[in-house]
Each structure stands twice: as structure tokens, then as C-alpha cells.
Amino acid sequence: MSTDAPARQPRRRRTFSAFGEVRKMPSEYEIVTHGQNWTVRHNRASAFEQNPSSPANLWFLTYRDNSPLQAGDWDGFRDPDALTYKSYVNLQSQAEARVQGVVEAHAEAGADERLSPEWVAVLGRLVTPSRYLLHGCQQIEAYVGYMAPSSYITNAAAFATADYLRRVTTVAYRTRALQLAHPASRIGSAERATWEGDAAWQPARKAVEQALASYDWGEAFTALNLVLAPTLDDVLHNSFKEAARASGDELSWLIATFLALDCDRRGRWSAALTRYAVAQRPENAAVLRRWIERWAPAADDAAYALGGMLESAPGAGLSATTAAERASAARAALIEEALADTTLAAEAAGGQR
């Protein structure tokens, strides 16, 4: 009689898993994010359940499925912050409470009424019209999320879109407060004319409007998240904060500081997605390099023009050249982090004045 123990049979899976043969329990972030992009389905003939040659399906085929930016498995990407809808709402609820707190405290102290006319003019020319720029960026980010080849990318872009909406709303509230404090400044009524006619806004306006027509999802992502946004945000946050503090505007300094946290978070997942794309397919580095080189000059021109508006800030001593150089360096730092390629980072910083 044999004493050999019977061979152990592998335990049958009790549930079906969209994650395949996983060896660990997926996180809450992965469970609520994985496979939620319904335009990307296994064994699908097209993105939408209609004729594969319909305009919508041809659009996704051309600008997503046949994009030069490719990966073997986009679902392998993970947002470094692992944001879900629940965690994002909780995070931003606390962030909004901080913004609201400083706004109310400064309103009670009459801080806006004490601002100098020269600084109010800067705010009315640079800050209050910026909601047009930010809304354009919001639309580009929403497009990236809609066209993205994975729900992990879609969700990250959706939260970044919401961040832009938050900035637009904050600028709108700030505009109204300044309008009440300085009714003769034309703040609250001149923003559209400034956006459309002020020479200092035209490079940024041209860049964002052209980026809105970048239909390839990979180029739209590169144009906004890797080039335009980090460049212009450095002017609108870092250089602006320096000018605000020199002009005695503590409230604007605080708001810019708080909103910059959203930009930092967008930079983290954008850099992570870039690294992932190149790890999946090394040829993607050349694709990204081509797009970065295409958009960097427009970003530099816009940063120089926006920085010029800060030259008139009382006591700041900040030149347009300095603001543009800092902005270009901030972009190059993000790209270097994303690609670990100092040559690419140097090229991306090209076109500095």
C-alpha cells in the first residue's frame, strides 16, 4: 500500500478577477479605478458600440489607438497619490477650508482696501483675466482624460481637471472681492478685453488655443502637463508670490501657495506616466522629445510676456527675463525627473531669453 500523500490541487479561485493572476489583494484605489474606461474593452471592434467607421470611432482610432505614444499595457500605470473620488473630495474639502479661512480673515481686516493702486493694476491685468487661460487648460486636461487609453490615466486627468475648475472659481471670487474694494479699477468688467487685446496675454492665449487643437491624446498631454502648465504655473505662482509679498498682498501670496499644491500633484502623476510610457516602450522617449521641442518655444514666449506684467509690481524688482528663465528651469526640472535625461531637459529649456 502506497504511503505517498496525494498531490495538492491548486485552490480554485472563488471570484473572477479583472486583475488576472494577482498574488495580493488589490488596493481600494485599484479596485475602484481598474477597468472603468468603457471605451477600452477587450475584444472590442471599436471604442463605441456603433459602426467602426463612424466619426466618433474614427476619432478614437486616429488620435488614441494609433497615437505615436504607445504602450503594451496602459493599465499598469498607477497614480503616485493613488487618488480615488472619495480621497480627492476629502483632500480638497480641507484645502478649500484653508482658502476660505484666509479669505474671510483678510476680508474682515480690510486687506484689499489697503493695496496700492499700482499693485491693484497688476492684479487686474495678470490675475483676474487668468481665468480664461485656466479654463482653456481645464478643457485640455478634460480632453486628455476622455481620450486616455486607461482608466488610471482618465481618473488622474479628471482630478486635475477639477483642480483647474477650483482655480477658475477662486480667481472669480478674488475678482469680485477686488471689484468691491476698488470699483474704479475696472476689475470685474475688463477681463475679456484684456485677455483678447492685451499684448502681454497673446502668447499664452495663442499657446492654449493651439493646444486645444492638439487632437492626439499623447501630444495634448505633453503640451499641457509637461510643457505649458509647469512653465506658466511657475510665473503665476512662484514669481507672482514673490511680487505679491513685496507689494504687501499677503492674501494673494497665501492663495497662490495653497493652489500650487494642486500643480505639484499634477506634476507627480504626469512625471510618473511619462516614466511608465518610456519603460513600456523606449521609443516613446523620442516621441515625447519631438512634442516637447514643438511646444517649448510657445511656453517660453508666454512666460516672458506674463513675467513682463510683474515688472511694474512695486518693490518686486522682478524682470520678465528672470521670470521666463525660472519658468523654463521649472519645466526642465519636471522633464528631467520624468525622463532622467539631462540632454532632453537641456533641450526643453531651450529658447530662453
Image (cartoon, helix red, strand yellow):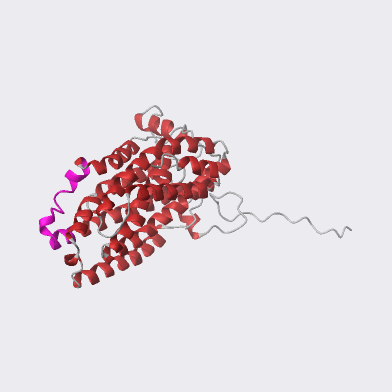
For the residue pair 32 and 335, the one nearer the viewer reads as 335
Does the image show residue 196? Answer: yes
Residue visible at 25% across and 67% down in the picture? 103
Counting labels gives 0
Residue 66 at what x, y percent from top left?
Answer: 47, 31
Residue 136 at what x, y percent from top left?
Answer: 29, 44
Residue visible at 44% across and 49% down in the picture? 329
The verdict on residue 312 being magenta is no
For the residue pair 221 and 313, the one nearer the viewer reads as 313
Left or right, 298 with reference to 43: left
The verdict on residue 191 being magenta is yes
Where does the C terminus fall, quadrant-wise? Answer: top left
Tell me which segment is drawn in magenta. 176-196
Picture layout, residue 19 above or below residue 243: above
Residue 189 at what x, y percent from top left?
Answer: 13, 50
Q: Which image quadrant for residue 291?
A: top left
Residue visible at 20% across and 53% down in the picture? 124
Residue 264 at what x, y percent from top left?
Answer: 42, 56
Picture layout, residue 118 above or below residue 150: below
